[in-house]
């Protein structure tokens, strides 16, 4: 017998020898609110140290351009998603690199990509969470490697809570990589002192658009 | 002093003695445990809601365990369908052999690892070193601990026994061009700099798994730092390692477990990252691993599974709340246990993995105060299980399911209990004995030194309790 079959047969034996009385499920379960609570999205993200801006969808490029001037953000890294196209069309950024060739651009991404911009496919209002799916037009590492990450997300793409999000993915299937992001990267591993930018972005900037 | 051992009973007393005498260590743990307990409490303001949620957590894990072999088959099938290669390991050695083989097959040179207790359990780092590989820990706490040639002292916060001054010294000594600083942001910045290089150059990434979802063949990994994302995204090969009990039935089971895990562990409503990995990079995707492997480890779990009561051990979601609330753990710290899993869950898991002859003494480091059982998010009856294992430790029953059972049994102790039982089941004898003991209390031999070394000597009262009650009643009769 193969290890797999031995393990499974031990489990089946064990189960038959002492069948369990299942633990009773709770009488009340959480009810999913019908509409996402935008205020809680904002406050949870801010509590997690993210910066949140709310505005009409048409307004974010101008706003971001002035923020970029103020912060002196020059070298932008993007994928081929909607946010990238809008930002490139806006034309205010001095340099926009499209990340599309892993082997050719990986070293530069790690060494000299200060800021990335991407679109989040959705969010979870209850916990202040962005939902980021891996897609051909949206590389996974863009939301991970550069120290500053700017995310565009639409209010109408938010789920009220995680159960609602799970119902959606159970129905529509999972992407190869589904990431929930709830703030900038952080750690409290040194004497319980919170520090941001452990391995991922130090700063997370969210445009929540109507 | 801080290595893991497969015979934790050996020198357990010495380690306890040393830990209790270490003022700095006790200060670290007291501070950290108070901090974590307060943060957890703040996340569960509504006690009724918490109890309902714990019911749900226990029910979800129990339902998964009831179908364990079937869910594992489903998980394997779904994973294969998604392009994840599945491997089964009966023992820690088998798992290490499989992982080493996978690394050799892709000619891996630089290996990074995200935080994972399963790989600690199988001693993967040592096995890889023996095979000529070095594997860099990338969780900040694990990195600090690995660099100091130590082992983690807590399952969630591995470097909890260290203060920032000692980490500052270590970084200044061991990392080139690093000045001494106690500024935590700068210290983390140093770790980030070193580990970024490692991530960028790594060809194999190893990670643990918090939950595996059978419905979709998804590996779920929760973390705050991004080391999990890096290890599972950047290297060409990703090897995920998990105990067979971690499988859950469906995506809909995840939300309640996610409501429980980070809140119980670190008092966070959600972790910064929740990774849900359902396959390697697709043809049309730009990044992500080209190969994803899942190594399923039994390592004694199927034996634990066979006992109806002990099976509850496998509900564990490794949140660490039981140790954060354990008064013994708070005073000893994790290293004194000598085990990968310290604290209450360790006292239950380790004797079952190593046998009561090697780890049975661990069950004695418990006052049965019950705090662990009250906070466990999946309602594992830890105090009951500790008592059960104490019983198995002295049980003469050959049918006991736990390895090394009866090996803690001592004839003298057994005789004392036999005598105690004999006296307590015979009222006349009992009266006679208590009468004699109270009247002749000054003539009794002193208690053994093991008792009196740290405690005041005990002396029987002038009268037995029954006599006292009789007397008391007489005085207060209306
Ligand atoms: S036994 Fe319970 S409290 Fe302890 S780590 Fe496991 S799930 Fe958490």
Image (cartoon, rainbow, N blue to C red):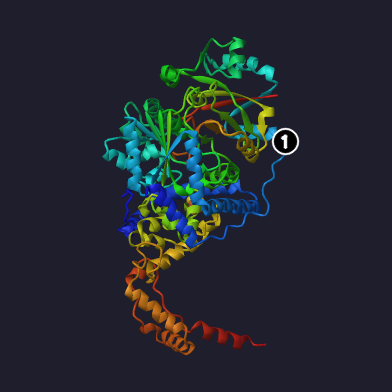
When asked about the image quadrant of residue A206, the answer is top right
Q: Closest to the observer: B74 or A86? A: B74
**Whether residue B18 can be seen here:** yes
Q: Closest to the observer: B85 or B439? A: B85
Residue at position x 53%, y 22% in the image: A136
Looking at this view, name the residue that lies furthest to the front. A1
**Whether residue B219 can be seen here:** no
Residue A50 located left or right of residue B6: right
When asked about the image quadrant of residue A25, the answer is bottom right
B128 above or below A154? below
| Position of residue A159 measured from the top left corner of the image (x, y, whole percent) | 66, 34
Q: Which residue is mark 1?
A: A35
Callout 1: 10 Å neighbours few (<14), some, many (20+)? few
Residue at position x 54%, y 35% in the image: B272
Residue A177 located left or right of residue B455: right
Tell me if the residue at label 1 has its CB under 8 Å from ligand 1.
Answer: no
| Position of residue B293 measured from the top left corner of the image (x, y, whole percent) | 42, 36
Residue A6 located left or right of residue A49: left
- Subunit bearing disc 1: A
B1 above or below B114? below
């Amino acid at each position: 017998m193969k290890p797999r079959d031995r393990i499974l047969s031990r489990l089946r034996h064990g189960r038959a020898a002492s069948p369990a009385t299942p633990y009773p499920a709770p009488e009340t379960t959480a009810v999913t609110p019908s509409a996402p609570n935008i205020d809680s999205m904002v406050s949870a993200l801010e509590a997690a140290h993210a910066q949140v801006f709310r505005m009409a969808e048409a307004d974010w490029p101008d706003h971001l351009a002035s923020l970029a001037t103020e912060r002196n953000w020059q070298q932008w890294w993007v994928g081929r998603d909607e946010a990238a196209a809008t930002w490139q069309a806006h034309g205010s950024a001095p340099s926009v690199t499209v990340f599309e060739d892993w082997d050719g651009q990986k070293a530069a991404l790690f060494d000299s990509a200060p800021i990335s911009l991407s679109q989040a496919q959705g969010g979870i209002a209850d916990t202040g969470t962005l939902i980021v799916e891996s897609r051909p037009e949206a590389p996974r590492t863009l939301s991970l490697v550069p120290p500053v990450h700017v995310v565009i997300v639409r209010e109408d793409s938010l789920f009220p809570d995680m159960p609602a999000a799970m119902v959606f993915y159970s129905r529509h299937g999972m992407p190869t990589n589904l990431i929930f992001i709830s703030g900038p990267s952080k750690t409290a591993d040194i004497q319980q002192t919170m520090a941001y930018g452990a391995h991922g972005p130090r700063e997370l900037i969210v445009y929540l658009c109507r | 002093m801080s290595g893991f051992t497969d015979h934790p009973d050996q020198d357990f007393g010495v380690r306890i003695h040393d830990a209790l005498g270490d003022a700095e260590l006790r200060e670290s743990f007291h501070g950290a445990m108070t901090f974590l307990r307060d943060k957890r409490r703040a996340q569960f303001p509504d006690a009724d809601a918490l109890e309902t949620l714990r019911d749900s957590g226990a029910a979800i894990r129990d339902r998964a365990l009831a179908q364990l072999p079937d869910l594992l088959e489903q998980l394997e099938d779904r994973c294969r369908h998604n392009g994840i290669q599945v491997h089964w390991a009966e023992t820690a050695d088998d798992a290490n052999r499989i992982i080493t083989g996978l690394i050799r097959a892709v000619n891996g040179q630089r290996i990074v690892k995200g935080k994972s207790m399963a790989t600690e359990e199988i001693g993967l780092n040592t096995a890889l070193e023996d095979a000529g590989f070095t594997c860099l820990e990338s969780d900040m706490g694990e990195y600090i601990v690995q660099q100091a040639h130590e082992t983690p002292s807590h399952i969630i916060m591995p470097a909890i026994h260290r203060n920032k001054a000692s980490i500052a010294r270590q970084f200044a000594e061991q990392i080139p061009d690093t000045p001494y600083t106690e500024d935590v942001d700068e210290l983390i910045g140093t770790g980030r700099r070193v580990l970024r290089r490692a991530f960028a150059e790594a060809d194999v990434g190893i990670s643990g798994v918090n939950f595996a979802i059978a419905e979709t063949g998804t590996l779920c990994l929760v973390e705050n730092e991004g080391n999990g994302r890096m290890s599972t995204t950047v290297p060409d090969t990703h090897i995920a390692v998990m105990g067979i009990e971690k499988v859950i039935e469906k995506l809909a089971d995840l939300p309640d477990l996610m409501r429980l895990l980070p809140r119980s562990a670190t008092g966070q409503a959600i972790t910064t990252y929740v990774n849900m990995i359902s396959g390697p990079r697709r043809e049309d995707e730009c990044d992500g691993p080209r190969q994803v492997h899942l190594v399923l480890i039994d390592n004694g779990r199927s034996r634990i599974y066979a006992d109806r009561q002990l099976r509850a051990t496998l509900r564990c979601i490794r949140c660490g709340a039981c140790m954060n609330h354990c008064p013994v753990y708070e005073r000893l710290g994790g290293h004194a246990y000598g085990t990968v899993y310290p604290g209450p869950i360790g006292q239950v898991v380790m004797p079952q993995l190593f046998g009561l002859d090697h780890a049975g003494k661990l069950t004695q480091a418990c006052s049965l105060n019950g705090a662990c059982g009250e906070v466990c998010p999946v309602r594992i009856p830890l105090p009951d299980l500790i008592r059960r294992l104490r019983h198995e430790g002295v049980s003469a029953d050959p049918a006991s399911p736990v390895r090394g059972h009866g090996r803690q049994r001592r004839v003298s102790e057994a005789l004392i209990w036999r005598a105690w039982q004999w006296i307590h089941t015979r009222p006349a004898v009992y009266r006679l004995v208590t009468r004699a003991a109270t009247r002749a209390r000054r003539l009794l031999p002193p208690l053994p030194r093991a008792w009196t070394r740290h405690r005041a000597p005990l002396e029987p009262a002038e009268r037995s309790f029954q006599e006292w009650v009789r007397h008391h009643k007489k005085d207060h009769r209306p």
